[in-house]
Amino acid sequence: MKGIVFTEFLEMVEQEFGLEVVDKIITASQLPSEGIYTSVGTYDFFEMQNLLGNLSAETGIPINDLIYAYGLYFFQALTKHHRDIFNLYTSPIAMLASIENHIHVQVRKIYPGAELPTFKVLNQQEDFLEMMYFSERSMYMFAKALMEKTFEHYHENSKIEMEMIREDGSQVRFKIYKQPHAVNHQN
Ligand code: HEM
């Protein structure tokens, strides 16, 4: 897992829960990196699992909710550092359908050693996208958050349904609907 994922994560924890909680979870996690991450470095995924587990224990918030919140936060970093990629697309469905064959392909060049999920597009329509998510890291709530944020980025509304194909979350079917804008009846 790339260092940027850790540095952004710890930044979110500091912002939401304070520096004391950052120190606490780093100490409790017994990390080979000692909690010192550089954005170009690559670290073991189990460090993230430890940090999430200890943050969950500290705050009482379930791990999946923390991963979802983290996805919402991480999106800002993506649009900040990789606006050029977002500018290539004019619709959220086109963008999401291109993660596997274009976006994460670029990501592998920019971040050597990145551990990325696999997405398979099963059905793509103008306002509907069905994709299968595969990853041994089971970060499907991170995916859901990034998908919702992608719609927001293009000023569109979405409804996202998930179906666990494997119980451990390593294979999840996403049904992504572009929702119409609310009509404003003010006469
Ligand atoms: C400019 C756009 C994007 C960039 C630059 C980008 C980059 C990255 C990076 C650097 C990682 C971490 C890799 C690692 O830790 O080794 C990652 C992971 C991930 N990305 Fe993207 N990403 C982009 C868009 C998206 C979008 C729109 C989605 C929506 C589904 C997505 C889904 C994921 C997921 C789910 C992971 C977690 C790893 C896993 O599940 O195995 N990415 N991405």
Image (cartoon, rainbow, N blue to C red):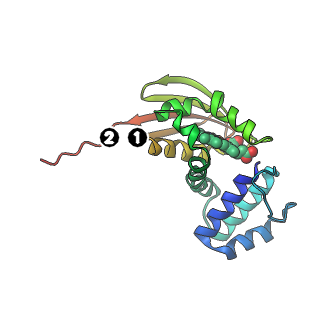
Query: Mark 2 vs mark 1: which is more N-terminal?
Result: 1
Q: Is residue 15 above or below residue 89?
A: below
Task: Name the residue: 71% across, 59% down.
Answer: 7
Name the quadrant containing residue 174: top right
Q: Residue 181, which numbered label?
A: 2
Kindly identify the amino acid type of the residue bearing the numbered disc 1.
Glu
* Image coords of residue 76 (percent x, y): 56, 52
Residue that label 1 marks: 156
Name the quadrant containing residue 121: top right
Q: Is residue 86 above or below residue 31?
A: above
Task: Name the residue: 68% across, 34% down.
Answer: 106
As drawn, the residue found furthest toward the right would be 32
Please state which of residues 37 and 119 is positioned toward the viewer in this rendering.
37
Please state which of residues 102 and 22 is positioned toward the viewer in this rendering.
102
Counting other residues with Cα less than 10 Å from the Cα at mark 2, is it few (<14), some (14-19), or many (20 or more)? few
Counting other residues with Cα less than 10 Å from the Cα at mark 1, is it few (<14), some (14-19), or many (20 or more)? some
Please state which of residues 132 and 166 is positioned toward the viewer in this rendering.
132
Left or right: where does residue 183 sit relative to residue 113? left
Query: Is residue 162 shown to the viewer in this render?
Result: yes
* Image coords of residue 46 (percent x, y): 80, 53
* Disc 1 C-beta below 8 A from ligand 1: no
Asked if marks 2 and 1 touch (Cβ < 8 Å), the reply is yes
